[in-house]
Image: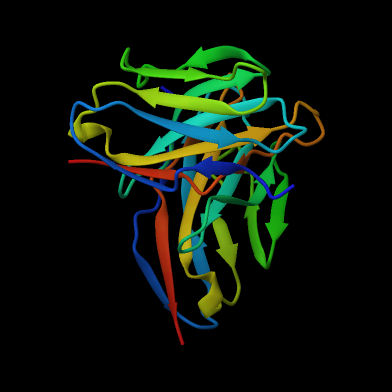
Amino acid sequence: DTGVSQNPRHKITKRGQNVTFRCDPISEHNRLYWYRQTLGQGPEFLTYFQNEAQLEKSRLLSDRFSAERPKGSFSTLEIQRTEQGDSAMYLCASSSRDRRNTEAFFGQGTRLTVV
Amino acid sequence: GDSVTQMEGPVTLSEEAFLTINCTYTATGYPSLFWYVQYPGEGLQLLLKATKADDKGSNKGFEATYRKETTSFHLEKGSVQVSDSAVYFCARRTGANNLFFGTGTRLTVIP
């Protein structure tokens, strides 16, 4: 297993277009998280899945954002009608439900630029 | 509300200097605390953690002690190397099992 994988690594899109990002977590991890990181800031939580269930969504996740994890494995994050303020690094992380080790492992992120 | 306040950077040190990056938190109860590191061009990596008061996390020569009296989790290293140049994030676990991060501190170590 090569860790958490995110695709694409970079995405440039025109304002108003829709974009979709993919995250493949570590295979035995049942928890998956999405974060957003803007320049000079720490990552901010967006949403969390346990298996295929989306258990929590941040207020940052406007109705233009939707995340899915249909089979409890990979996840997608879609942003509709992108705005310049959506430009950021989108990070995915996964963790195990093992109470002895709940470390979150992060992917390298997808950098979105909205022009 | 709950938060993490981290020392602002950037921090520039000479090789072998002593490093301290301050981190304080506010929370109800005693959340698990973490330091993550982001090397240039790489993803966030867990550096160390502490899950309860008075615990000391350590890794790669870095240490941080969970101090409930001062609600702090300061990161220290006795002798930094050029390879330690990175952005360091303090974080706490929330009740909902996700992470709340500080704003990050960029460290540059010069030879």
Residue A19 appears at what percent x and percent y?
Answer: 34, 30
Q: Nearer the viewer, residue B90 or A87?
A: A87
Res A72 quadrant in image:
top right
**What residue is drawn where x is 73% and y is 31%?**
A29
In the image, residue A31 sits, relative to residue B63, either above or below, namely: above
Of the pair B100 and A9, the residue shown nearer to us? A9
Seen at 51% across and 68% down, the residue is B19
- The vertical placement of A35 against B40, above or below, is above
In this rendering, the count of numbered labels is 0
Q: Outermost residue, bottom direction?
A: B111
Figure coloring: rainbow
Residue B74 visible to the viewer? no
Residue B69 visible in rendering: yes
Q: Position of residue A57 (x, y in %)?
A: 46, 16
* Residue B105 picture quarter: bottom left
Q: Residue at x 18, y 31 (%)?
A: A15
Q: Is residue A69 left or right of residue A109?
A: right
Quarter containing the N terminus of chain B: top left
